Image (cartoon, rainbow, N blue to C red):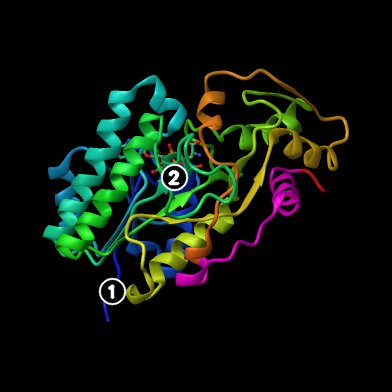
């Protein structure tokens, strides 16, 4: 039996914090090494080992993998959709080279498993808007989407050619209360809760009827770990799995929040992120993930909203 030693790269980010804490519960605090370019997130402090690491520095990464006897890598370091449009070269370089560095080291060091997330951003305006299938027309228009789609092919390539057991999910927009989102088009769905509680009002950067696929973080963390723990024989998709939680518009989310905070008011001032959102599907068909490894979401819009408000400090 392998004694797992897990490296989480990008552990101080929106997903990294919660995923690191969840992995530490399963594999033991000292067996999950958190790493990031930025300082250790407050919620991680005292819960396990942390190393400062730049995924672009392949040599340093390789040294850490050997020194820490790493058996699994979760690569979360990336530049997301909105920030990526401001600096396309930086987004392409980090999102591609970071992944290639990890895949190369995984191959050389016989790393047991690698996790790398893709995104609904792989889909573009020519993909089906509703219940977007696993395999369909994929023509992304953002540098982030292009990098994720290319990354999916690299994952499949390293699996087919070198046998690297790399697994991936196309996350929808993720909603969380523990850590802040890091520059995506779906970030409004987290900001709105903080402003609703603090200001009783929110100005949304997307139009009121912009439907997008979303997921509550507890579902995303559970799904990620379930995929990673599934027997390899069940994994038929080595590019990246579609995963669905819920779909809603800013207007619907605001309506749900108003049920808890009646005085809450929303207005709309769409910016450059509207075009990105308009290029993505409204909802996702995740039947292949359900069939292959038994994926099932738990949270819907009312459940997520009540839980967010409760955890952010309002008795709902
Ligand atoms: P985030 O921006 O919150 O976190 C990324 C972390 O990576 C940050 O802490 C950052 O400091 C770190 N990082 C950046 N450059 C680095 C480098 N060179 N070396 C080491 N660390 C570096 O992002 P997130 O929301 O946690 O996303 C994690 C992954 O999930 C990304 O691949 C992202 O594309 C994907 N994803 C996220 C969402 C979402 O809604 N959050 C949706 C779809 C896909
Ligand atoms: N939440 C992410 C973003 O908006 C989707 O990958 O960029």
Q: Which residues are magenta?
A: 290-313
Which residue bears the numbered disc 2?
A: 119
Vertical placement of 304 versus 167: above or below? above
Which label is found at residue 224?
none
Q: Secondary structure at mark 1?
A: loop
Instruction: Tell which tag, 1 or 2, sits nearer the viewer.
Output: 2
Q: Is mark 2 within 8 Å of ligand 2?
A: yes
**Secondary structure character of the magenta stretch overall:** helix
**Residue depicted at 36% across the width and 62% down the height:** 237
| Left or right of 113 in this view: 43 | right
Q: Give the mark nearest the N terminus, 1 or 2.
A: 1
The answer to whether residue 280 is above or below residue 28 is: above
Viewer-nearest residue: 175 or 236: 236
Helix, strand or loop status at disc 2: strand
Mark 1 and mark 2: Cα distance apart in space: 30 Å
Q: Are marks 1 and 2 in contact (CB under 8 Å)?
A: no
Residue 308's x, y, as percent? Answer: 69, 47
Residue wearing tag 1: 3
* Residue 250 found in image quarter: top right
From the viewer's perspective, is 282 left or right of 21? right
Q: Nearer the viewer, residue 243 or 266?
A: 243
Position of residue 243 measured from the top left corner of the image (x, y, whole percent): 51, 56
Give the camera-side residue of 18 and 84.
Answer: 84
Quarter where residue 79 is shown: top left
């Amino acid at each position: 039996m392998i004694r797992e030693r897990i490296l989480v790269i990008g552990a101080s980010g929106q997903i990294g914090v919660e995923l690191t804490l969840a992995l530490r519960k399963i594999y033991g605090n000292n067996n999950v090494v958190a790493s990031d370019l930025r300082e250790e997130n407050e919620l991680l402090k005292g819960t396990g080992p942390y190393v400062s690491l730049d995924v672009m520095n392949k040599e340093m990464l390789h040294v850490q993998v050997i020194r820490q006897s790493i058996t699994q890598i979760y690569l979360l370091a990336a530049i997301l959709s909105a920030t990526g449009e401001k600096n396309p070269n930086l987004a392409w370089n980090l999102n591609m080279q970071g992944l290639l560095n990890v895949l190369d080291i995984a191959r050389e060091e016989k790393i047991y498993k690698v996790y790398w997330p893709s995104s609904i951003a792989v889909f573009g305006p020519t993909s089906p808007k509703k219940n977007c299938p696993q395999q369909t027309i994929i023509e992304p228009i953002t540098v982030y989407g292009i990098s994720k789609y290319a990354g999916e092919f690299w994952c499949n390539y390293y699996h087919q050619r070198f046998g690297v057991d790399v697994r991936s999910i196309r996350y929808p927009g993720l909603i969380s209360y523990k850590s802040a989102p890091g520059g995506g088009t779906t970030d409004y769905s987290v900001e709105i809760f903080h402003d609703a509680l603090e200001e009783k009002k929110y100005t949304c950067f997307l139009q009121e009827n912009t439907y997008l696929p979303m997921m509550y973080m507890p579902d995303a963390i559970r799904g990620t770990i379930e995929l990673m723990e599934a027997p390899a024989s069940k994994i038929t998709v080595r590019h990246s799995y579609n995963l669905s939680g819920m779909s809603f518009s800013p207007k619907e989310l605001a309506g749900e929040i108003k049920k808890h905070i009646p005085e809450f008011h929303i207005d709309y001032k769409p910016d450059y992120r509207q075009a990105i959102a308009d290029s993505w599907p409204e909802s996702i068909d995740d039947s292949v993930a359900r069939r292959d490894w038994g994926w099932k979401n738990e949270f819907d819009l009312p459940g997520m909203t009540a839980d967010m408000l409760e955890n952010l400090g309002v008795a709902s």
